Amino acid sequence: PLGLFETDSLISEEDRAIRDTVHRFVQEKIRPGLAEWYESGSIPARELTQELGELGVLGMHLDGYGCAGTSATAYGLACLELEAGDSGLRSLVSVQGSLAMYAIHRWGSEEQKQEWLPRMAAGDAIGCFGLTEPDFGSNPGGMRTRATRAGGDWVLNGNKMWITNGSVADVAVVWAQTDDKVRGFLVPAGTPGFSAPEIKKKLSLRASVTSELVLDDVRLPDSAMLPGARGLSGPLSCLNEARLGIVFGSLGAARDCLETAIAYAQERDIFDRKLASYQLTQAKLADMTLELGKGMLLALHLGRLKDAGLLQPEQVSLGKLNNVREAIAIARECRTILAAAGITLEYPVMRHANNLESVLTYEGTSEIHQLVIGQALTGHAAFR
Ligand code: TGC
Ligand code: FAD
């Protein structure tokens, strides 16, 4: 459906080549296992991370330390292809590259970068990013997790919730309140007092590990703190990176649904002719294609602004709000075209629709992005 918009003509040859490589990887290596991972609610996270490291997508838009140093647009296009597979796969890559690795790359010491980034880029170490708490999701500034001084060390206490990759991570980037604002800490797995129980019974993002982080008198050396981040702008700067990936990624899920619905409508006989030949079906397909294409033009525009160093957080909010909202609407509309067949894992449509419920919520809910845009328009912060 994106062919109608000729959006490929807006993408450099190099970025297209990266996108096509990721597309092939998803088709050949990922798609065959997806329904099973989703149904069982488990993924081979470590093997998958290693394969993604070999593919070169982990921290791909970062420079040095074994990272590929691609454009932000290429990163977005990779996210689109990964999420055409499953939002859980894109989440794994977002959290590894844009949250955990970016936090270390942007705010870490040289020693921290040397220790973690090359292994994380190669997929030999997994990272997670602990910002959200049970009582503080949209308002991370209220966090209760606290890091206090004990001699030259730090002691961390608190709980993080809904943390992607938590139970499989080798290192957790944990944000905590200190006497000197919010600071970030690198907590290696196995540190006494630290555990990461997995959250089960999810009906969305089932092909992804989601965990609680428990910090019970976790003692860390001073060198575990990210020296560059002081205040909430530290973690929020990482969110800007990951949210851009979602601006693109959500369109991948929508595209996969739309392609599935078009193919299904061409095959399915209704009354005495093909479902695709009915005007009502065509109106749905045309409207969805329009939103997909508009979303793609927006994503490419934001990607280019990012590559030019001009992208503002409120512009990322425009993209995240629009593209996830439209992607979930497309997934649900496609499900109506497949009707009963659409409710099973035989087709990817309801899996994507269910995943997008999480995508609508994480990385800033739609309401939070409306308020960010509202603040940019009016100058009034209406969060509290
Ligand atoms: P506020 O007082 O406005 O700002 C505090 C400080 O932060 C700065 N700031 C930003 N810096 C960088 N990027 C941004 N987007 C920023 N937004 C604000 C601001 O300038 C200020 O700096 P300073 O130096 O003056 O201290 O903060 P607030 O408490 O009023 O909150 C603003 C709000 C609501 C927009 C923010 O808290 C927010 O974005 N909430 C949503 C939380 C969220 O998105 N959490 C996501 C957790 S990670 C996740 O979901 C991963 S999902 C898995 C996956 O990605 O696949
Ligand atoms: P709440 O903040 O309790 O919001 C409840 C409702 O209130 C929402 O509709 C919200 O939009 C609305 N609301 C909030 N504030 C306002 C306001 N000022 N005005 C009007 N309405 C408002 N977090 C991490 O730190 N790391 C991760 O890796 C991570 N992975 C995740 C993976 C999954 C699958 C999911 C579902 C979540 C993940 N999260 C992660 C957490 C995610 O970022 C939070 O769920 C999200 O920020 C929203 O927080 P909450 O769920 O506590 O909702």
Image (cartoon, grey):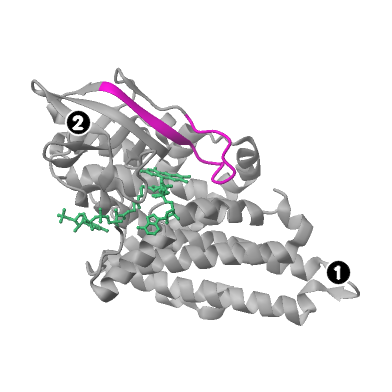
Q: Quadrant of the N terminus?
A: bottom right
Task: Please state which of residues 230 and 251 is positioned toward the viewer in this rendering.
Answer: 230
- The amino acid type of the residue labelled 2 equals Ala
Q: Is residue 228 magenta?
A: no
Q: Residue 71 — which label?
A: none
Residue segment shown in magenta: 198-217
- Whether 55 is drawn above or below 149: the answer is below
Q: Relative to residue 102, is residue 357 drawn left or right?
A: right
Q: Quadrant of the C terminus?
A: bottom left
- The amino acid type of the residue labelled 1 equals Asp
- Which residue reaches farthest left? 151
Main secondary structure along the magenta-highlighted residues: loop
Q: Position of residue 229 (x, y in %)?
A: 16, 45
- Whether 59 is drawn above or below 331: the answer is above
- Which residue reaches farthest front? 384
Q: Residue 269 — which label?
A: 1
Does any portion of residue 342 appear in the rendered image?
Answer: yes
Q: Residue 147 — which label?
A: 2
Query: Ligand 1: which quarter?
Result: bottom left
